Image (cartoon, helix red, strand yellow):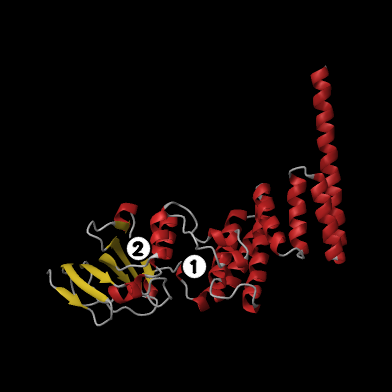
């Protein structure tokens, strides 16, 4: 069929390229929809912006979860399985597409699309999208324009038919998932399964970072989420210490202390990381800061100082033996 069908929505035109099968699927909140898509400009060259087939994997969205490009839900609800259709969408529907495209491209490149949250403070987050890191997307963001989406509907699953991933959860579900993930991370840590614990802590952090983007930076709810995130990041750093990944632990703890210099546990964890890489002065300075902020941690600080002195003495003895052997 090549006739253009006008959906009952302002600013959308649909053209069916290949008819689908069966009735329209019953999409409810929580249904997962799998589809291939190609996004093009409406210029004479039909410039391609994104193509899921070139990436090598289809797109998934969950209905009703405040997806970044809400118009896709409207388009998909008009399609039958295996249908291929082309949708012209006016700028009222495409303004946020550059941000979505950035996330999709980073996923395809094996990057974490939320990673920028981990290394910028709240005020910086407000300006994080001044550049998206891709020239064509920056241009599209500055000058929004109509876009064409060619979509092939591949699969529709009811909420009970698939295992929902953390990023697919609604805001309420994300908040409910955090203590479960936190508890599971603690359980795995106690069992010495540090990789598994790290994964659980990271999933919880991603949930909270996502929720935090919906709040105004440095206001009450944003700060509550920030406090929860810092706790999880420090738990994650404890896993890093157990796995010998000391420099990453230093990076994360230093990032926390740049923005929140009054967190004693962050100094304590960073001190242990400094000690592990023989930064004696830095480790002692951080332990002293722990005592200033939390005098009740005196026993733990003394233990760490004894361990540090013992390790340094062992290292000095090894160096003495090495020198003696070289001279011998």
Query: Where does residue 326 sit, x and y in percent of width and height?
Result: 79, 20
- 107 over 173 or under it: above or below: above
- 158 over 264 or under it: above or below: below
User: Mark 2 highlights which residue?
Assistant: 59
Q: Residue at x 75, y 65 (%)?
A: 263
Q: Is residue 206 visible?
A: yes
Please indicate whether residue 193 sits to the left or right of residue 12 in the image. Answer: right
- On-image quarter of the N terminus: bottom left
Hey, which quadrant is residue 42 in on the image? bottom left
Hey, which quadrant is residue 143 in on the image? bottom left
Tag 1 and tag 2, C-beta contact below 8 Å: no
Residue 166's label in the rendered image is: 1
Assess disc 1: are there few (<14), some (14-19) or many (≥20) residues with their C-alpha within 10 Å of its C-alpha.
some
Q: Residue at x 47, y 67 (%)?
A: 167
Query: Where does residue 101 sit, x and y in percent of width and height?
Result: 39, 61
Q: Residue at x 43, y 55 (%)?
A: 134
Query: Where does residue 280 sit, x and y in percent of width and height?
Result: 81, 45
Hey, which quadrant is residue 196 in on the image? bottom right
């Amino acid at each position: 069929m090549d006739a253009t069908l006008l959906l009952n929505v302002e600013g959308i035109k649909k053209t069916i390229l290949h008819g689908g099968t069966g009735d329209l699927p019953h999409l409810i909140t929580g249904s997962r929809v799998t589809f291939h898509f190609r996004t093009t400009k409406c210029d004479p060259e039909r410039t391609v912006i994104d193509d899921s087939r070139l990436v090598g994997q289809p797109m998934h969205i969950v209905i009703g979860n405040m997806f970044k490009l809400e118009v896709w839900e409207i388009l998909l609800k008009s399609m039958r399985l295996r249908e291929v259709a082309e949708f012209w969408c006016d700028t009222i529907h495409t303004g946020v597409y550059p941000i979505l495209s950035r996330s999709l491209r980073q996923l395809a490149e094996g990057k974490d699309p939320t990673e920028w949250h981990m290394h910028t403070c709240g005020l910086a987050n407000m300006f994080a999208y001044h550049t998206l890191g891709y020239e064509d997307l920056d241009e599209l963001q500055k000058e929004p324009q109509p876009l064409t989406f060619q979509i092939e509907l591949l699969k529709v699953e009811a909420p009970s038919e698939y295992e929902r991933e953390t990023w697919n959860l609604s805001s309420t579900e994300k908040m409910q998932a955090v203590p479960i993930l936190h508890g599971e991370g603690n359980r795995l840590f106690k069992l010495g399964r540090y990789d598994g614990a790290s994964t659980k802590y990271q999933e919880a952090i991603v949930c909270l970072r996502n929720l935090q983007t919906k709040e105004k930076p440095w206001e009450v709810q944003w700060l509550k989420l920030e406090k929860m995130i810092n706790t999880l990041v420090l738990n994650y750093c404890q896993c890093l210490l157990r796995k010998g990944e000391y420099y990453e632990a230093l990076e994360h703890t230093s990032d926390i202390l740049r923005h929140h210099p009054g967190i004693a546990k962050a100094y304590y964890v960073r001190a242990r990381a400094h000690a592990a890489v023989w930064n004696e002065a830095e480790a002692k300075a951080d332990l002293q800061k722990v005592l200033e902020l939390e005098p009740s941690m005196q026993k733990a600080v003394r233990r760490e100082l004894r361990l540090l002195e013992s390790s340094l003495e062992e290292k000095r003895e090894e160096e003495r033996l090495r020198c003696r052997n070289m001279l011998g």
